[in-house]
Image (cartoon, rainbow, N blue to C red):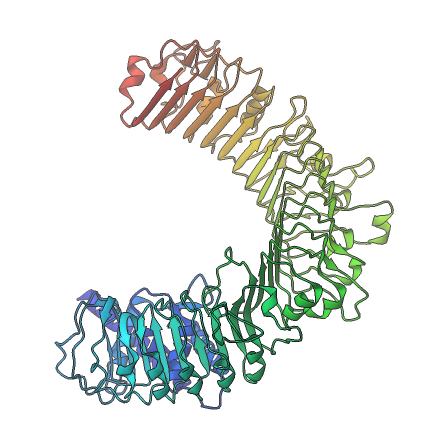
């Protein structure tokens, strides 16, 4: 009873929210959302197409305007908690309880909906005595194996069906549904002749259908939206589609067998606003009007006759398909793909302005033809004969550029050529820049960078740039206020991330600051001398959001933040890196210490990293691991990995002394010298949360766990049992190891141990004592070799 009362109260609240919705079209949009199955990510594009097909917009209104109004309605419903967001902006979700309420509203006499979506139906729900009052039927998300004939649905306007794959739709199934305006069918075999009586149909969506007799489409003269998605049986569009004078949207994405579109079919669709072909469908564009079979085929020039075209998605297989004097129409949204774009997935409605180039040679004129107005995303892969990707004459087109990704272009020498631009700043909308495997790239920006502002750039990824010696100038670095991710790898000539020349600090009055930077990953930059220049260390709290710092295989690296004499009087407040969680340094043979000397001069003499949970370091033996030897650190670590160090014992002792081991769950000691027992008794007592231990490659190690120190008596039993949280223990390549546990094992319990891996332990004569073996109640995996 309490559950029923709670449900009634929830329905009452939802009813009030629904009644208080200001606009009828918001209510209609809400009701349309219940047509989809439970827990479904509802595509906003589908809602738009249903709304247009149902006549919920004016005939003179562009589809894009209707799409915007649907989006506004959805945002209003989100604000009222009647719809939920998803991981993508293109979808929305309905809570189960809200959907039940929406179905209750939709099933009323006012709406006349019948919704049985996603409930596993195999047959048409004949339990319903009459369908005469139904205006909308949704059976999507089912796998119907048969359909009835002779249904009478005189008021039906919307029908959404999903059928078992390959099922044939009866020829007379639609005879009693002459008022249908929206029809969506998925997974069946259909002769379009069966639709000839649906003369009021405005939106036809066919998904994974075996379509036959497409010439009968000419009967559907009121059709505004025609969609074939993944209809693999379609090899050719019939010329009769060109007779659909009211058609606004034509979508054939995923129709991989489509080889031919007759010449001038597209050009006759004068009201066409949106043409979606995608990357896998028709690719037979020919500027001379003949395809390889000798039949007449479509040409890109037909697009110029479509004065209302606003949205376009298509693939052009080769440069030769673009007529010499062809100019793309002015578009609001587009996905244009040229050449081999197999690495890029773009099937669906374009949500931005995007240009993808792959596996082709480009001349400057062709690139300018493709460089459309309001370009936001550019991806270039495996393109030759391109030396400057964005020449100065295209600067006007960079105002809206948000994402640039360039990969495997062997001839590219610079990305952006900067000229004297009056309208400043350049690249101010750029949020993401990715450059991969560009062996000839010498600079990213060529020219006066004072005209450039990167204040929107959040993600910078660089990989395999063999000739790059620096990335940014100090003036550019000043504008990186929103940079969140910096990833650089395999750039062997890179010496400086921020170039700092003599006198530069006098020219640039402000020091670079990175208030949003969360992740720094630098790998395989053999000539890099430091990550940040001196000027960064002059800025108090210059990296306040840094969470992950990872540097490896940088043989010349001496400092993370460079310091010079005369800079140490600059004393920042402690902690300097308040949010640092992960710190990994490896194979940096010349790195003296991670953090600058000035960091040690704080009020209490202790360096604090309050959020640091994972520490993995491999440094030179004669240097300390975080800073100079007089550093005192406090680290609330959970994971610790020490590799290739000669003084590991001192490290562990220092961590224990400063109270940094109580939270440790994972410890790895690898290839470390001058260590005989990495876990002395005093340290072991503090490791109450230790779960995983890996020790290997330590040639002098004789025992792993020292249970009682030499000067202690057996009566001093403290904080028992030891190692009770340990779940995994891996020991390998320890030639001097004589015992794993040294001391009275009665102080130890291995009650949580699940995995024990032992290999290449030349002097080990036994593993467990009888008392230890009795505690192994959870041991599942035991590996012993060599």
Is 55 displayed left or right of 124 in the figure? Answer: right
- Tell me if I can see residue 688 in this picture: no
Is 314 displayed left or right of 478 in the figure? Answer: left
Residue 384 placement (x, y as % from top left): 65, 55
Q: Nearer the viewer, residue 747 or 148?
A: 148
Picture quadrant where residue 4 is located: bottom left
Quick one: quadrant of the C terminus? top left
Picture quadrant where residue 300 is located: bottom right
Residue lying at 29% horizontally and 22% vertically, measured from the top left: 775
- Tell me if I can see residue 528 in this picture: yes
- Relative to 427, is 653 above or below? above
Picture quadrant where residue 758 is located: top left
Residue 38 placement (x, y as % from top left): 29, 66
- Relative to 688, is 577 above or below? below
Residue 431 placement (x, y as % from top left): 62, 60
Q: Nearer the viewer, residue 262 or 91?
A: 262
Quick one: quadrant of the N terminus? bottom left
Q: Nearer the viewer, residue 168 or 18?
A: 168
Residue lying at 45% horizontally and 22% vertically, measured from the top left: 684
Is 502 displayed left or right of 392 in the figure? Answer: right
Q: Number of labelled discs? A: 0
- Relative to 193, is 437 above or below? above
Residue 663 placement (x, y as % from top left): 47, 34
């Amino acid at each position: 009873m309490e559950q029923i009362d709670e449900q009634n109260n929830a329905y009452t609240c939802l009813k009030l929210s629904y009644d208080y919705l200001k606009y009828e079209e918001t209510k209609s949009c809400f009701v349309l959302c219940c047509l989809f199955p439970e827990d479904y990510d509802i595509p906003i594009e589908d809602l738009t197409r249903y709304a247009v097909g149902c006549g919920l917009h004016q005939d003179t209104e562009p589809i894009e305007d209707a799409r915007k109004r649907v989006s506004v309605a959805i945002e209003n419903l989100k604000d009222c908690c009647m719809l939920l967001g998803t991981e993508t902006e293109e979808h929305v979700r309905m809570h189960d309880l809200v959907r039940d309420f929406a179905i209750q509203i939709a099933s009323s006499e006012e709406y006349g909906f019948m919704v049985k979506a996603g409930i596993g139906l195999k047959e048409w729900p004949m339990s319903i005595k009459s369908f005469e009052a139904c205006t909308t039927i949704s059976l999507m998300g089912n796998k119907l194996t048969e359909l009835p004939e002779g249904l009478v649905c005189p008021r039906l306007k919307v029908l959404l069906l999903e059928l078992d794959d390959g099922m044939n739709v009866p020829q007379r199934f639609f005879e009693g549904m002459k008022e249908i305006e929206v029809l969506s069918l998925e997974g069946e075999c259909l002769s379009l002749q069966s639709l000839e009586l649906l003369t009021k149909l405005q939106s036809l969506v066919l998904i994974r259908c075996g379509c036959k007799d497409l010439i009968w489409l000419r009967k559907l003269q009121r059709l505004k939206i025609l969609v074939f998605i993944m209809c693999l049986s379609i090899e050719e569009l019939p010329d009769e589609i060109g007779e659909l004078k009211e058609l606004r949207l034509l979508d054939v994405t995923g129709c991989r067998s489509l080889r031919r579109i007759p010449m001038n079919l597209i050009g006759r669709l004068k009201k066409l606003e949106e043409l979606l072909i995608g990357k896998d469908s028709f690719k037979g564009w020919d500027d001379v009007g003949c395809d390889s079979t000798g039949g007449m085929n479509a040409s890109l020039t037909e697009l110029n006759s479509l004065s209302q075209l606003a949205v376009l998605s298509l693939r052009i297989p080769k440069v030769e398909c673009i007529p010499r004097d062809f100019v793309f129409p002015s578009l609001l949204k587009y996905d244009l793909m040229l050449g081999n774009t197999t690495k890029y997935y773009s099937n669906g409605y374009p949500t931005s302005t995007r240009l993808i180039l792959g596996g082709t040679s480009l001349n400057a004129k062709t690139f300018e033809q493709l460089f459309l107005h309001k370009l936001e995303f550019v991806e270039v892969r495996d393109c030759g004969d391109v030396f400057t990707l964005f020449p100065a004459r295209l600067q006007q087109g960079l105002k809206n550029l948000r994402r640039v990704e360039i990969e495997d272009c062997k001839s590219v020498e610079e990305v952006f050529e900067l000229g004297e631009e009056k309208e400043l700043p350049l690249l101010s909308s750029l949020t993401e820049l990715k450059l991969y495997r560009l062996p000839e790239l010498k600079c990213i920006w060529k020219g006066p960078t004072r005209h450039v502002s990167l204040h929107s750039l959040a993600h910078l990824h660089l990989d395999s740039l063999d000739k790059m010696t620096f990335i940014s100038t100090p003036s550019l670095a000043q504008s990186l206020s929103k940079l969140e991710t910096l990833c650089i790898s395999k750039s062997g000539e890179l010496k400086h991330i921020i170039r700092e020349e003599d006198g530069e600090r006098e020219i640039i009055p402000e020091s670079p600051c990175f208030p949003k930077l969360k992740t720094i990953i630098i790998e395989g930059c053999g000539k890099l001398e430091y990550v940040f220049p001196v000027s960064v260390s002059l800025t108090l709290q210059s990296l306040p959001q840094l969470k992950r710092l990872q540097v490896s295989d940088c043989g010349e690296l001496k400092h993370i933040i460079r310091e010079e004499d005369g800079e140490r009087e600059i004393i920042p407040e402690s902690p300097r890196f308040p949010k640092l969680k992960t710190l990994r340094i490896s194979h940096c043979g010349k790195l003296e210490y991670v953090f600058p000397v000035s960091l040690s001069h704080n009020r209490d003499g202790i360096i604090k990293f309050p959020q640091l949970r994972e520490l993995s370091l491999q440094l030179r033996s004669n240097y300390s691991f975080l800073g100079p030897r007089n550093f005192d650190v406090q680290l609330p670590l959970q994971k610790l990995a020490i590799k290739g160090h000669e003084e590991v014992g001192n490290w562990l002792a220092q961590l224990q002394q400063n109270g940094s081991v109580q939270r440790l769950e994972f410890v790895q000691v690898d290839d470390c010298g001058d260590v005989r027992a990495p876990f002395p008794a005093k340290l072991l007592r503090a490791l109450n949360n230790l779960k995983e231990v890996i020790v290997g490659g330590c040639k002098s190690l004789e025992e792993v766990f020292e249970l009682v120190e030499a000067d202690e008596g057996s009566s001093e039993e403290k904080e028992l049992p030891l190692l009770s949280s340990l779940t995994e223990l891996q020991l390998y390549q320890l030639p001097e190891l004589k015992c794993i546990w040294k001391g009275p094992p009665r102080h130890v319990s291995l009650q949580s141990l699940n995995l024990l891996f032992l290999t290449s332990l030349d002097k080990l004569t036994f593993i467990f004592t009888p008392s230890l073996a009795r505690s192994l109640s959870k041991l599942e995996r035991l590996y012993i070799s060599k």
